[in-house]
Amino acid sequence: MRHDDFDTSFGSEPSGHGSRAARILTGISSRAWEHPADRAALAALRKLPAFDQVLRTLFGIFGEKPVRLAFQANAVQVGPNQFPRLWDLYTEICATLDAPERYPLFVSQNPVVNAGAYGMKHPFIILNSGALQLLDDDQISYIMGHEVGHVMSDHVLYRTMTTLLIALAGLGFPIVGLAARAILFALLEWSRKAELSADRAGLLSVQDPDIPMGAMLKMAGGGRDEEMSLAEFVRQAEAYRESGDMADQIFKVLNLLGQSHPFWVLRLSELRGWIESGDYDRILRGEYPRRGDPDPAYAEDLSEAASGYTSGAKEMLDQVTGAARRAGESFFDNLRRR
């Protein structure tokens, strides 16, 4: 992959490609990498009307074991004797993030370059075979660290909810009427913010900024190393960041198109911004919250942002409900005229 003459490096020394990161982040709390918008959107999501009803309904329809089997039935579990090289990389990543456990990891025969962390009470990770074909070992490690970050941030239940609702909406299955569609819109809004948090966790798992940025370039363009320039992609991302609030306007449109992930250039730009803020280097120096530490300011930090998210989501719910009511009234009016 060409780097040209554009400096994509940052202050920290990379750990070296193909080897485990030197800094073990002992006891690190997921708060260290969570994006403020992720936490705010999730807090607001839990306050939405009908959210608990939709969650209980999904649990009632599917349940833990059927969901787990549905995701895992057409995949191979990774271990010392299945994909051993991948297992070694995964073990290193979990050790670096000091993950509480080695969450079950599976490889699924799927050409789409993607991965996901799912489950209700028992999380697991699915890695598509397409990712193994496109990405190198370091980039695969970043992807796995990204998914471990989702698990440690307790994202998996809501990501599973999002996946199920998208599938059911595609089938035209009304789970709890129009409320479910409004909940899905809010879940997609949160999901995009959650990806920004997991990108940070992925970087911390490999501790070399070029690795996640190179992976993002490949996943955006799908080309070979010799065909693409990371420096040019960084320039593209910086130009996108300079567009300011335009990204928010685009996402308002994409809310209606079922997008669960942000644009790759936006994700790269956000990651660079986090590194430039100094938070990344501080974490590598050991200055990060530990699991079990009190977080008294958490609720206060979220209050104002969560209020805004809740208000916006409630407005969307009202709009969807109002549109449906008007459509029904129009339908009956037409019937009466005949």
Image (tube, rainbow, N blue to C red):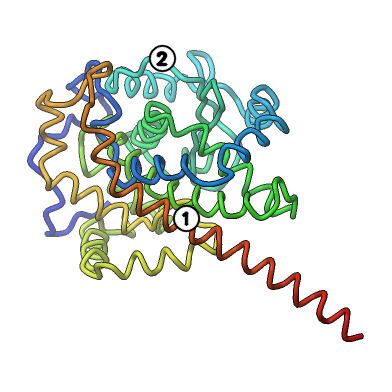
**Residue type marked 2:** Glu
Above/below status of 265 relative to 107 = below
Of the residues under marks 2 and 1, which one precedes in the sequence? 2
- Quarter of the image for the C terminus: give it: bottom right
- 299 with respect to 86 (left or right): left
Above/below status of 199 relative to 333 = above
Q: Nearer the viewer, residue 175 or 78?
A: 175
- 11 with respect to 294 (left or right): left
Q: Nearer the viewer, residue 321 or 212?
A: 321
The image position of residue 6, as x and y in percent, is 13, 58
Q: Nearer the viewer, residue 264 or 233?
A: 264
Q: Nearer the viewer, residue 164 or 89?
A: 164
The residue positioned 40% from the left and 59% from the top of the image is 221
Per the rendering, the mark at residue 313 is: 1
The residue positioned 23% from the left and 31% from the top of the image is 32
The image position of residue 246, as x and y in percent, is 31, 70
Residue under circle 2? Answer: 101
Above/below status of 308 relative to 121 = below
Give the structural element (helix, strand or loop) at label 1. Answer: helix
